[in-house]
Image (spheres, rainbow, N blue to C red):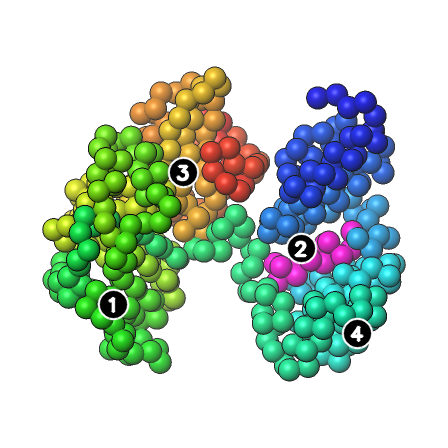
Amino acid sequence: MEYPSVEVLMKQIRDWAEEEDYDAIIEVLPELKTPGQYYEAVLCVAYAYLNQGFYHDAEEWLRKVEDQGRESGVWNYRLAVALMHQMRLEEALPYAERAVTVEAGYPWGWLVYSKLLYGCQRTEEALEAAKKGLVLMPGDEEFTSLIEDISNGLSFFEVTGVEEDDGKVENGEEKAGTFCGSVLLNSVSFDVDKVMADLKTEWGIEPSDKPGDMASDDASADESTRVFYLGETLVAISLMPARVPDGEAEYYAETNYMWPKAVEVTKTHKAHVLVAVLAHGLTPVEAGKLHVKVIATCLKQPNAIGVYVSGTVFQPEFYIEVANMMKEDEENLPVLTWVYLGLYRNEEGNNIYTYGMTAFGKEEIEILGSKHNFPELQRFMLEIAYYVIGSDVTLREGETLGVSEEQKLPITRSKGVAVEGMTLKIEY
C-alpha cells in the first residue's frame, strides 16, 4: 500500500502500535527513509511487543536502535520493562535509572525504577522513587498502591506481578506442565471411585501419603470430585453437571478430520469431567503422560463419548489406544493426544499447524503454502513434534531443521496465521 506522505505513514504506525499489530509495522520499515523515522517505528514495535507480553522480542528490537535510544527516556524505560519481565533486575536497573535521569518528567519511568529498586533490595530508594512519580501523577492509584505495598513489605511478585519465569518463555509457554481437558458425558453421572480404582489397577497411580504439607486426598471431595497429589503435582478430577459452555466443544469438534461423527456425537453431551494436572516436581513430559493416563481412565466410564483437549475432540477409542502405547513401553510418547495437527488448504498451497506445544514450553509450529500433500505434512510435522518434545529441543529463528543430514529447512518466527501469538514457520 502506498501512503501519500511520511506523516500519514507514521500516524498509521502509531495506530498499529496501539492495536499491538507489530507485524504490520515491521512490514513497512523499509519505506522509512530517515534514521529518526526508523527509530520511532522501532519504539512502536517494542511497545506492541511489550503489551503482548513478548519481552524478549521487545528487547531485540530496542537493541537495534541502542545508539539513538541511549539519551531517550522512553527507550530506556521500555528496555528496563523488557528486562524486568525477564527477571534480569540488576541488568534492567541502570536503564530505569537512565530513563528518569534524561526524562525526569516522565512518571512511568519512576514507576519501573521504583519497582526495580525494590527488586534489588533497595527499599528506601524504591519508596523515594515512587513518591517522585506520585508528585507527577497526584492521586494515581498505581503509585499509591505501589507505595503502600512496598511499605507493607510485600514480595516482589506481589508488588509487581513479575514472576521468576515471566517472559522467559513467551507465547503462553510459561504454562509448561499445566494440562487441562474435558471428558464429555452423555448423562450427568460419574463414578469417581471407579476411576481411582482403575488408575491404581491399570497405571499404578495412587495419591502420595504425604504430598508436601498437603493432605493426600481432598477431604472435602464429594462423590464426583477428587483432588489429590502425586508428590507435589496436583491432579484434579471434577464432574461439571452441564455442557461445555458457549458451544466450545462442538466448535472444536469440527477440526477432527479423523472422526467424521465428532460434531454429531459431541452435540449429545450433557455434562463433562474436568481433568487437570498442575506439575510441580515433574517435567512437562511426565505431567503430560500423567494427564493422558487419567483422561484415558475416565474415558472408560460407560457414558463417556469423547474428550475435548488439545484444540479438538478425540474419539474415546482412539485416545485410549494411544494411551495404551505407554503400557507397552513407558518411553512411548502419546504425542497424538498432546498435539493436534490442523490441516487446511488455500491459494498458496497446503498448510499444517500444531496446537498443544505450549504445554511443553515450546512454540507452536506452522508450515504454510506447501506443495506436499496432507499425509506427507502430517508425517513430517509429527516427527518434528515428537523430536522437539521428546528431546526437549528449542527451535530458534535462523536455524535449519531436517529429518536427514542433507535436509536443511529454514526456520523463521512471526505472528501466527492459524494459531494465536507468535509461531515458528518451517519452509517445507
Q: Amino acid at mark 3?
A: Thr
Residue 395 point in image, percent of width and height: 49, 42
Question: Which is nearer the N-term, disc 4 or disc 2?
Answer: 2
Badge 2: how crowded within 10 Å, few (<14), some, or many (20+)?
many
Q: Is residue 240 left or right of residue 133?
A: left
Where 64 sits versus 81, above or below? above
Q: Which residue is mark 4?
A: 131
Question: Which is nearer the N-term, disc 4 or disc 1?
Answer: 4
In the depicted view, which residue is nearer to us: 249 or 173?
249
Q: Are marks 3 and 4 in contact (CB under 8 Å)?
A: no
Residue 216 visible, this angle: no
- The span from disc 1 to disc 2 (Cα, nearest Å) is 40 Å
Q: Which residue is mark 2?
A: 82
**SS at badge 4:** helix
Q: Which residue is mark 1?
A: 226
Q: Nearer the viewer, mark 3 or mark 1?
A: 1
* Residue lying at 46% horizontally and 41% vertically, measured from the top left: 364
* Residue lying at 86% horizontally and 59% vertically, measured from the top left: 103
- The span from disc 3 to disc 4 (Cα, nearest Å) is 48 Å
Q: Amino acid at mark 2?
A: Ala
Part of the protein shown in magenta = 75-87
Q: Amino acid at mark 4?
A: Lys
